[in-house]
Image (cartoon, helix red, strand yellow):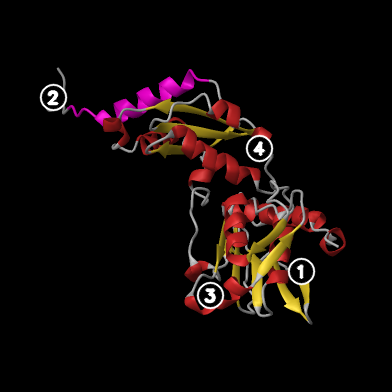
Amino acid sequence: MAPAGDFKAEFRLSITRAMATQLAETLDHLEPVHLTTANLARLEPRPGVYELYLLGDRVYVGKADRSLPERLEKHRIKLSGRYGIDIRDVAFRCLYVEEDLEAAAPEKMLISEYRRRDPNRRIVWNTNGFGNNDPGRNRDDSLVKVAHFDAKYPIDLNASLPALGAGIREMRAYLESVKFALPFTFRYDKSPATKRDLSSSSVELRGGPLTPRELMWEAIRGLPTGWQATALPGYLILYRENRRYGSALAVWRKEDGEVAEKRLDAMYAEDGDSEGASSVYSDLQLHFEPLTLEEGTE
């Protein structure tokens, strides 16, 4: 005879667990494809969930509230401007989801399901700041954690960007064009105190593509003395200042009337193994060759 109490139990239906399992099983039948504009053009502008893969490993699970191709295109642009990542090594797969399910945070369901399947396997970009937006002016001086996405894959200052066109540009219009052209965040000082500098300065562009380094060089050359452009691991900033940022990769400012570009020894906040960030910085150092912009614009 069974011991007293063993003849009854309580059953609880977990709707979220059931949905998570079905989402993951549906995705399991899909093959990741390269994150290209051609593949994104095949998607409908509908909400959904998606997964990013780097060299075959699942690294990110995300959600698009309105349009999967729009959200994935932002990732494609961001990843195309990073050291240590070849965009040809990035792939994705996705699911359209109904609006009712979208409100239930399906990406979190998927992450929980994958953790349940393999507790020892992390989805690394979901926890290292990959999806973060511009942290804002108050965070510019904060040291970037060594395990952060931006420390492992800093912005590519030598990336070849589409040409902005030849000719003279008013400074504010030029900086807005730069914001649009860069594959990462660029923020500049728009406060009332800078209005005169921005309205009275200009840039004369040569034809052909330019790199982020060259774009910053041109901005500093056109602006009055006192402005500084700074490359932080995840973005560029331009302010009227003379300031050393702990995690800065490089700065541009005028010295004796000439533009000076300086590569800096970036510092990172201790947070786990620093080997990854050190190796990325070594690559950055190797690729940071002197500019020849002055000769090319004569």
Q: Which residue is mark 3?
A: 195
Quadrant in which residue 187 is drawn: bottom right
The residue sitting at the front extreme is 167
Q: Residues within 10 Å of mark 1 (few under 14, many from 20)?
A: many
Residue 261, numbered circle: 1
Q: Which residue is mark 2?
A: 8
Q: Which residue is mark 4?
A: 87
Mark 3 and mark 4: Cα distance apart in space: 38 Å
Nearer to me, 12 or 198: 198
Q: Are marks 2 and 1 in contact (CB under 8 Å)?
A: no
Residue 230, percent across and down? 65, 67
Q: Amino acid at mark 4?
A: Ile
Q: Amino acid at mark 1?
A: Glu
Q: Are marks 1 and 3 in contact (CB under 8 Å)?
A: no
Q: Amino acid at mark 2?
A: Lys
Looking at the image, tell me whether mark 1 or mark 3 is earlier in sequence order: 3
Looking at the image, tell me whether mark 3 or mark 2 is earlier in sequence order: 2
Of tags 1 and 3, which is closer to the observer?
3
Q: Residues within 10 Å of mark 4 (few under 14, many from 20)?
A: some
Which residue appears at 32% of the width and 34% of the height? 102
Looking at the image, tell me whether mark 2 or mark 1 is earlier in sequence order: 2
Residue 94, percent across and down? 47, 28
Of tags 1 and 4, which is closer to the observer?
1
